[in-house]
């Protein structure tokens, strides 16, 4: 009695690996990759920020206003959270 050492046709199809395209990737793919890299590195934001000269005192003032804004927003959020807590739990 002979034994055949063959795999079924379907199993052969499962083992096949998809072919990789030869040559460079298309332009739109390269452009998308480039945009993502630039965005992650923050290059665009830095260029926009450096477009015009800003005096050192204006930079400091901007920084202080940012801190003040953040403190104000945090205070408002705390008040809203307290009001929501009072409404739900009968404080």
Image (spheres, helix red, strand yellow):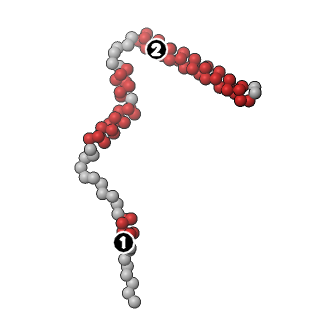
Q: Position of residue 31 (x, y in %)?
A: 30, 38
Specify whether 45 is left or right of 63.
left
The label number, if any, that marks residue 49 in the structure image: none
Q: Point out the image quarter for the N terminus.
A: bottom left
Residue at far bottom of view:
1
Specify whether 88 is left or right of 5.
right
Q: Is residue 24 above or below residue 42?
A: below
Which residue is denoted by mark 1 in the rendering? 9
The secondary element bearing badge 2 is classed as helix
Question: Counting other residues with Cα less than 10 Å from the Cα at mark 1, is it few (<14), some (14-19), or many (20 or more)?
Answer: few
Q: In the image, which is nearer the foreground, mark 1 or mark 2?
A: 1
- When asked about the image quadrant of residue 81, the answer is top right
| Residue at 54% across, 15% down | 68
Residue nearest the viewer, comparing 75 with 10: 10
Q: Position of residue 59 (x, y in %)?
A: 43, 14
Residue nearest the viewer, comparing 48 with 12: 12
| Residue at 33% across, 18% down | 51
Residue at far right of view:
90
Which residue is denoted by mark 2 in the rendering? 62
| Residue at 36% across, 36% down | 36
Q: Is residue 9 above or below residue 17?
A: below
Residue nearest the viewer, comparing 11 with 33: 11
- When asked about the image quadrant of residue 48, the answer is top left
Residue nearest the viewer, comparing 81 with 5: 81
Specify whether 42 is left or right of 28.
right
Circles 1 and 2: CB atoms closer than 8 Å: no
């Amino acid at each position: 009695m002979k034994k055949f050492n063959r795999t079924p046709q379907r199993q052969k199809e499962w083992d096949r690996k998809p072919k990789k395209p030869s040559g460079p990737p298309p332009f739109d793919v390269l452009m998308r990759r480039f945009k993502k890299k630039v965005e992650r590195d923050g290059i665009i934001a830095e260029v926009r920020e450096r477009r015009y000269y800003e005096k050192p005192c204006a930079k400091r003032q901007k920084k202080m206003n940012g801190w003040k804004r953040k403190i104000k927003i945090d205070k408002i959020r705390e008040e809203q959270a307290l009001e929501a807590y009072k409404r739900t739990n009968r404080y």
